[in-house]
Amino acid sequence: MTLEPLIDGFRLFFDVSTLLAIAFGTLVGLLIGVLPGLGPLMGIILLLPLAYHMEPVAGMGLLVSIFVAGSCGGAITAIMVRIPGTPLAAATLLDGYPMMKRGLAKEAIGTAVAASALGGIIGGLILIFLAPLLADIAIDFAPPEYFALTLTGLLTIAVVSREATVKGLMTGTLGLVLSTIGYDEFANVSRFAFGIDGLLGGINLVAMVVGIFAISEIIDQIRHGDLSAKPDVSVVRPSFSSAISTMRHWRNLVRSSVIGTGLGALPGIGGGISAFSAYAIAKSASKRPEEFGTGIADGVVATESANNATVGGTLIPTLALGIPGDASSAVLMGALILLGFFPGPGLFEKHQDIVGGIFWAYMAANVMMFFVGILLTPLFVACIKLQKRYLLPLIMVLCVMGVYSLESSVFDLWVMLVFGLVGYALRRFDYPLPPLVIGLVLGPVCEGNFRRSLIISGGHYDIFFSRPIATTIIVVNILLVLWMLIPKSLKQRVFRRLGSAASEA
Amino acid sequence: MKITACLKAAGLTAVVGLLAVSQGYAQFPERKVQVMYPWAPGTPTYGVSQLIAEGMAKELGQAVPVVAKPGSGGVKAFKAFLNSPADGYTIADGYVAPLVLAPMFGNADWGCDDFIPLYSATSNSFAIATRPNDDRWSDFKSFIGYLKDHPGETRYNGNELTLPHMVAAKVLKQLDIVSRPVPYPDLALGMKDLRNGTLDWLIVNPGMYRANKDHLKILATLSNQKAVQEVYDGAPTPKDVGVDLGISGLTASGWDWWLVHKDTPEDRLDKLRGAMQAALKDKDVRDGIAKAGFVPTNYSPDEYSKVCNSVSDELKSAKDAVEWEKKKVRALSQ
């Protein structure tokens, strides 16, 4: 890409109203991300009417900054109280909360905010310089490739389940089964809704995630008693130097950001799964994989840089093709259309200034998010330092408000409560919870693309093995499964032999 | 004792009476008026509904939020609407799918005449599109010829009993040609697969056309209306190419009427109608609708029953066309 859009767009971006809109959007995004149940999508929708009445770049800057900061805010709650503020932050629980438990809350939040900002910026650079190229690659992904990719995503269940692989696969399968509830667009029938209106559209993912993590945590805390005790949270004042300490993990940071951007560029994949995938790959590539899940910064860097880089990734097909990368970017695309600009190749040719302005706004939102996140963290932590008997009802009220606001649905509140109990039962028997989310998120994408592929091929399974990209991904998946089946001792012996052979050579 | 009891009763009666009087004189609306929207939020369709709602809010002096309740082809939102009281505080954004199609498929037990219209809102007309560089055909006639010569060898986006697919199946049946429908949850994914060669042609709406103008060639609109032709930059209408597609009026488009409960008090109905009429005349609202590629339908409440029921009749034959298509595709696969 030439630098012309950036030069033309700078004039539209460097304007008081645009900068204020970005700052305001960043603040709203962080708050909305921190609150359980509300996520960037809800934040964007809430401020959509305001954006329609603004100048195009200011309006898009407001919405993009909510998207960026909302994708990070959830990590703060995940780290501090083991409740992901948004489904995107579910993977950050894996190492973020154990870090807090180890007395490293300051480091964990600082790392999460810095990794989010840096991951977002890397995703932004890829967006700015490679958008049309990556969009062309993304367009070659047809249903068989999507199906193969979702299998890779499902394999991450085995990695994030740590030592409880079988239990992880069981909860992952439960997620897959639950994802079949709702309307089957292929057969035009409702599946497993049992005549319940609230299940016609399937289980609401946010209600389920809030229930499974937040409500089960509340029940768990109550069961432990001692409600007058303040949570064991030290005063947390992350410093701006966390950006430097995060950059020490540069290899992981860049790799996870590239994974996030790449998966984000594929319409329909989304941030949640990119965070889990980046985590799984970071763990596999680490020299000390056994430390993942015990509270190490590498785990937080992987998940947070990936889910914020995904924001840049989703904007690639949205702006360059007019095909939204996920639900939040679909709303951004709708806003852009209502502001009078149709995304797609034409936008890059005819309205370079608008494209450039949005790029600047995206980058500025990431920078502002870093500063706002670091400055506001002590405030968030002060709320969490309340006695449990005040804190737990407060979290409960926020969960109820967040989930109810999604669709003004009382049924979703029941879903949240039921999954709270399910989550609690799973915890009691040491079943890992993240695989349930992976199963539920990937289930519809996996099933839909499998069935669509077979319709395209007329029922012939060779469609998965006759296309180079799909075949490659499937072969890699098979190799990954085989690798997992090899006993650990054998793997260590192979590595030792390879190491000694290399040193002899 | 008796006097005290009498005084208490009198006091209570006075309070109840005052409350009743104040209720009677209270200006409608006293609080927000919700619009139940049957699809996912944030799309251009949602934005257009928000524009109209904002226009109404200006007139009513109260907020008019558009609440998205996606699920089950719009039935979920309609059920939520029907479960709300008939007090004018809940409006249904009545799209053709939940209003006409859902009862037709046995997924709902209501009909057009179970609701009272405020006004018709907009329409979003479909067209047949292909890749601009596809050399198998050059125009709609040669496209039909190719599909006739190659039955079942081409693919397009078609989701079971959704409106665009039903319209497409009706057109295909009318022309006696067979192409394989591939279901997509989102038109955008179908667009992607047209561009990568998985699909051969596409049923598009104006929003998708405008976003991908350079990668689409409109072979024909599915409506003979001038306004629709303008939305698709002068693409030929079925009439222009001398083809009878067997559909008319609003059948080949997504459309919505804003509806309220049948038992809504008359004064509240008038107030809501007045507000919607004013909103639809508002220049900003009209400009916003045009920007998104939608066409205001401009039907008055009196025309609702006729328009809704005639579309319903035409779509019944479109439903049969989907069955016809299934049999043909199955026969070709054997």
Image (cartoon, coloured by chain):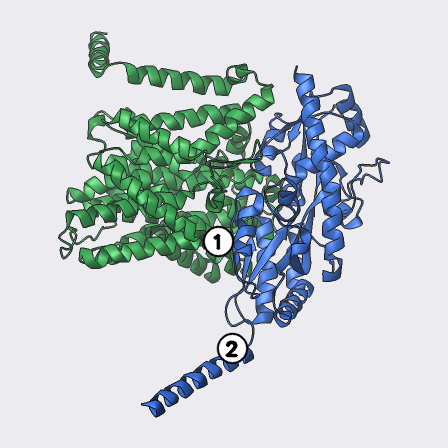
* Chain label for disc 2: B
Helix, strand or loop for disc 1: helix
Note the chain letter of the blue one. B
Q: Residues within 10 Å of mark 1 (few under 14, many from 20)?
A: some
Which residue is drawn at the image coordinates 69% and 18% (left, top)?
B331
Query: Which numbered dot is residue A459?
Result: none
Q: Is residue A138 left or right of residue B118?
A: left
The part of the image, by quadrant, that contains residue A158 is top left
Residue at image mark 1 = A45
Amino acid type, label 2: Gln
Q: Nearer the viewer, residue B181 or A54?
A: B181
Hey, what amino acid is under mark 1? Ile
**Image height check: is A213 above or below A285?**
below
Q: CA distance from mark 1 to mark 2?
A: 34 Å
> Percent position (x, y) of residue B247?
78, 41
Specify the label residue B23 is tagged with: 2
Q: Position of residue A423 (x, y in %)?
A: 29, 40
Query: What residue is drawn where x is 19% and y is 34%?
Result: A294
Quarter of the figure with the C terminus of chain B: top right
Q: Quadrant of residue B267?
A: bottom right
Seen from the viewer's position, the closer of residues A120 and B211 is B211
State the quadrant of the N terminus of chain B: bottom left
Q: In the figure, the green chain has which letter?
A: A
B71 and B283: which one is in front? B71
